[in-house]
Structures are given as C-alpha cells and as structure tokens.
Amino acid sequence: MDAISVEGLTKRYGDTLAVDDICFAVPAGRTVGLLGGNGAGKTTTIAMLLGLLIPTKGRITCLGHDMATDRFAALARMNFSSPYVSLPAKLSVAENLRVYGHLYGVPDAERRIAELAGELDLAALLRRPAGQLSAGQKTRVALAKALINRPDLLLLDEPTASLDPDIGDLVRSWLERYRAVSGCTILLASHNMGEVERLCDEVLMMRRGRIVDRGSPAGLRARYGREDLEDVFLDIARAPASASASAPAPGGVPA
Amino acid sequence: MNAAAARRVWGLIYRHLALYRRSWPRLIELAYWPILQMCIWGFTAQFLAGRHAGAVTLAAGTLLGGVLLWEVALRSQMGVAVSFLEELWSRNLGHLFVSPVRPRELVAALILVACLRMAAGVLPAILLAWALYAFNLFTLGPVLVIFFANLMLMGWWVSLAVVSMLLRHGAGAEALAWSVLFGLTPLSAVFYPVSVLPAAVRPLSLALPSTHVFEGMRAVMGAGVVRWDQMGWAFGLNLLWGAAALLLFARQFRAARRRGALLNVGE
C-alpha cells in the first residue's frame, strides 16, 4: 500500500506555475527524498501534502485518506518538521510538547515526552523556554514535536539545516532508528546530498515545479555517470530549461 | 464536541495559560487598561456628581456602567484577536494547521481564552468601581447576564472579522486588533443615548448590538425597566453579524490555504 499517492498535482500562483502536474507514490515504510534547487517546488509540494495549501489541480491521498475531503483523519497520523516554522518561544520545551500531545491526542503524553527527551537528549532542556535554545537544540525539539504522536507518515523539510555535523549525524541516526523500529514512511526535502544518500530509498528530482527524474541514489549516480548525488543534482539544476528527464545521458542531465 | 475535540481545544487553551504563567507583563496588561479607564471615568463621574446632585448623579452612574460594560466587549474582542496574534507572532500557525485541529476548534479555544482574559481584565475594574465609587454593577440584577452575553458575542464576531483580516494581510493588519472596536465606540451609544447622535448616523448605530445593550442599561438604571425589545434586537443583530463574520472567516481561511499563507503568514 502507498502511504502517499499524488496524481496530476499542480499549483499555480497567478502566472507562476509552482508545481506542474506531478505524479508520484511513496510505498509505506519507505524514505523518499525530494530534491531540487531553491524554487523547484519542494516546499509547495509538502505544503499541499499537509493540507496547508490547496492545489490548483490534482489529487493527494495520504495513508488512504483523500486530503481534499478527509484530511484530518490523515493528519492525526502524520507529522511535520521544518526549520521555517517555530514553536512558541516563551513556552518551555515540555509545555510545547505537552500542547502538541493534546492536539494529537497522545495517550500518556507525559511518558511519551520523557521517552523523546531521553532519545533526543532533551532532558536537560525540558524546562527551558523554546526561544532560548540554540539552532541545534531547536531542531531536536522540532523533531520531538514531529514524533510526539508516533506518526505513520513523517514529512521533513530540511530537518538538519543549520545543524553542525555532529548534531546532524545524531539526528540522521535517530531517524534511521525510528524508521527501523516504527516502519514509518518519511518524505524528506533536503539540500544535503549526503543525508539523502544515507536516508533515502528513492529520490524524486524536482526542477521548475516538475519531477524531472527519480530513482534510488545509487541508480541515479550510475545513470548520470557521477560519483555522488551532488553532481547529479548539479547536472539537473544546470541543464538547459528545455531538457527533459526521460532518457539519461552519461555525465549530464538526461536528454 | 467529542472527547478528542475537547482535548484539542484544551491543548490550545493550555498553550495560552502556559504563556501567561511565564509572562507577567502580559498578565498585568490584561487588567491595566480596564482599571485605567475606570479610574479616569470614575473620578470624572465622582467630580460631576459632587457638583450637581440628582440627574447628574444618575448620569455618572450610567457613565460608570457604560465604561465597565464596554470593557466587556473590548476585552472579549481583543482576547480572541490577540490570542490569534500570539500564534502569528510565534510563527506557530504552520504547526497548528498540520495537526488535527479543526478551524472551529481553534475558534472555540480562542473564545474560551478570551473569556478568561476578559474576566481577568474586567473583574478587577468592577471591584475597583465598587471600592472607590461605591458603584456596584451587580445591582443591575439578573439582566446583567444578558448585557454581558450580548457584549461578549459582539466582541467575538468583531474579532473573527479581525482574525480574517490577519489571515488576509498578516501581521500588517495587527493594529485592527486594538482599534476596530474602539472605532465603534461613538456609534455604540455607550455614554449617551442614541437620540443624541445625528439622524443620519442613527441607523448605523442601531445596526450594532452594543447600542441596544446600552439603551437597555440606561432603561434599567434610569427607570428600573428591562427593555426586552432592546435585548431581542441585540441578540438578533449578534446572530446576524456573527453569521457574517463566520462566513468571512471561513472564506479567508480557505483563501489563506489557497495562497499558502498559513505556512508563512507574518509581516
């Protein structure tokens, strides 16, 4: 069964086509990366998957629920983390997590908060106001919030942006463990190619609102004749606007 | 409302209670303006009543009643609008609206928080009026409940319209949270009867529920009569304006989802 199914998804703002008729499916239990340069349409796609943004056209199904008509049933089993959305700064970390424990109807929320505090090394931060945390600490708290309801589907927008390599590695390790234990499906938008190679089973390459290529990180590297995903990314990002992705050409964007 | 919905509403209320527990300036601000208003108008009324007995004493009483009751509407309106602004200022809307919280649950929570804020703001002013000027608002009798209910309802629908503008224009429209209801004060016949207003303005005044509440208040204080017709008008107008405000909120919420404003609403 697919955890996410997207058909003909389009978002237009006036004359600007932010997402252009994309189709993809994410099988349950898989981690899929959404890659693309700035303005490629990743965040817009995630916002539509979360119901924050109404598509101009197309159909989204998450965890078997149509997001146009039944999004709240899906949202209870989903969660989201982004460095661009904050938690109330005056509230302590524990209070913030408690709020979201209530909103997601988490049974025995205090126990869940204690679990997350242990796993994400937040115990010493629980009583501190969220606004007084460092960027790395805020990211770990945001991740704790995203996991408070043990989501079946996790959408992460640049989960390790602004983290130092050590904390970034801890977060990635934790995501790997969480997926292994829970069987959770993860859709990850990131600019960190190492992270994508490490975490993702499959990658969707976006450019100018379209999915221009897809495949496993290793498969994409092989197809483009590149040693790492970053070069694949650059090939796609710098390809002429007219290039399509149906037939790969070694060492360059598929022609 | 089922148990899950009630828990979500409680979660949203808890968020604001936790905020006030950690922010004493916010707590003080709740009571500051009502008390300040009460002091200014209370001493003015005391001064006038001391110089002229009889009719002026009655006018002074209605002035104090007007101040206190108008604060009920003001604090109810600001309670909803400022609580929504707190979410906007903290850039938390993106998290809230990807949770299972329904918009109606958010509105319910904002209204309940506004009730608490209104009580925290207005009750000290009522006590102060009693302590300083021997003015007991509760002598109005059980009809006071109807006055309160109507003014709170009006505060809520005005604030829903303000929240709709915040969804449309972001924090750039935040001045509306403080100014809209103040702007309606001259039309609401708070301190004078509606007959004082120019004839051309009276229809506008009579279209506001608050006007009927204050006309009703003056009838109780002056003649000891409960004007049920005025109360009927106040409730009817509240229902009408409330339905319009809900419609506006629903439309602006949907428009915000269409524009993507919920993720990055701000300045």
Image (cartoon, rainbow, N blue to C red):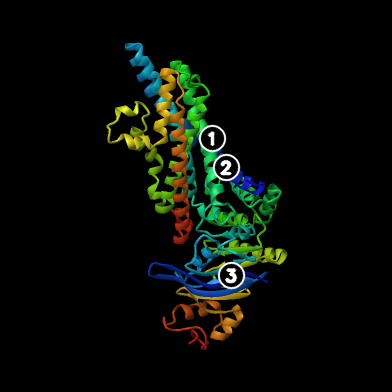
Q: CA distance from mark 1 to mark 2?
A: 10 Å
Provide residue A109's location: percent of width, then percent of height. 68, 49
Amino acid type, label 2: Ile
Dot 2: chain letter: B
Looking at the image, is B193 positioned above or below residue A6? above
- Are the numbered discs 3 and 1 placed on the same chain, yes or no? no
Q: CA distance from mark 2 to mark 3?
A: 38 Å
Provide residue A202's location: percent of width, then percent of height. 61, 75
Dot 1: chain letter: B
Q: CA distance from mark 3 to mark 1?
A: 47 Å
Residue A153 as seen in the image, left or right of residue B172: right
Residue at 72%, 64% (x, y): give it: A181
Provide residue B73's location: percent of width, then percent of height. 44, 34
Q: Which residue is mark 2?
A: B13
Residue B7 as seen in the image, left or right of residue B129: right
Residue A30 as seen in the image, left or right of residue B202: right
Q: Nearer the viewer, mark 3 or mark 1?
A: 1
Q: Are marks 1 and 2 in contact (CB under 8 Å)?
A: yes
The numbered disc on residue B116 is 1
- Category of crowding for the residue at label 1, using alpha-carbon neighbours closer than 10 angstroms: few (below 14), some (14–19), many (at least 20): some
Residue at 66%, 66% (x, y): give it: A176
Q: Which of A211/B9 is in front?
A: B9
Amino acid type, label 3: Glu
Q: Are marks 2 and 3 in contact (CB under 8 Å)?
A: no
- Look at the numbered disc 3 and give the secondary structure of its residue: helix
Residue at 59%, 42% (x, y): give it: B14
Q: Which residue is mark 3?
A: A195
